[in-house]
Amino acid sequence: MGVSIIMTWNPNKLARKLRKNSSDAERLLWKKLKSKRFEGLKFRRQQPIGKYIVDFACFVKSLIIEADGGQHAGDSAKDQQRDEWLKGEGFRVLRFWNNEVLGNIEGVVESVRNHCFSSP
C-alpha cells in the first residue's frame, strides 16, 4: 500500500516567506507605504486574500498594489483572472512594473495617491 502525502496550502507561512524575499521594487515601495507613512493609511504587504497573496493591500481604500517583475510578462491571463476575482471582491488593483517603481517611485506614489482619493 502506497503512502500519500496531503499538503495543505498555508497562506500565512507563504506570505512570511515572500516578505523575507521581497524584490528591490517591493522594498522601495514598502518604505513609502509602511507605518501609515502614506497619507495615514494602513497598508499590509504580502497579504493573503482568498486564494491569492497580494503585494500590498489597503483595506480602508479597498486597494491592491502589485509590483510586477519579468515573471509576469508571460502570465497576463493569470494576472487578469486574479485581478477580476479581486475586483469582484470589491478591490481596485494597481499594477506597476518593477522598473517603473525603481525608476520613478514618486510617480508611482502619486498614482497611488490619485487612486486612493478619487472616486471609484
Image (cartoon, grey):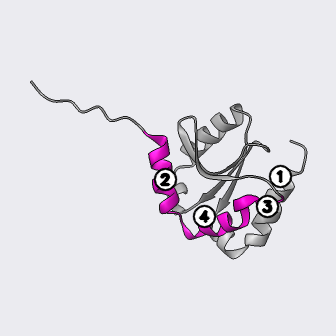
User: How far, Cα to Cα, is label 3 from label 1?
Assistant: 13 Å
Q: Is residue 34 magenta?
A: yes
Q: Quadrant of residue 77?
A: top right
Q: Residue furthest bottom?
A: 103
Which residue matches tag 3? Answer: 38
Looking at the image, do the residues carrying marks 4 and 2 touch, with CB atoms under 8 Å apart?
Answer: no
Which dot, 3 or 1, sits closer to the camera?
A: 3
Q: Which residue is mark 4?
A: 26
Residue bearing mark 1: 115
Badge 1 marks a residue whose secondary structure is helix
Asked if the stretch drawn in magenta spans residue 114, the answer is no
| Residue beneath the point at 67% across and 65% down | 29
Q: Position of residue 11 (x, y in %)?
A: 48, 42
Left or right of residue 13, residue 64 in this image: right
| Rendering quarter of residue 7 | top left
Q: Amino acid at mark 3?
A: Phe
- What residue span does the magenta drawing correspond to? 10-39
How busy is the neighbourhood of tag 3: few (under 14 within 10 Å), some, or many (20 plus)?
A: some
For marks 1 and 2, the one nearer the N-term is 2
Q: Position of residue 69 (x, y in %)?
A: 55, 62
Amino acid bearing label 1: His
Residue 23 figure quarter: bottom right
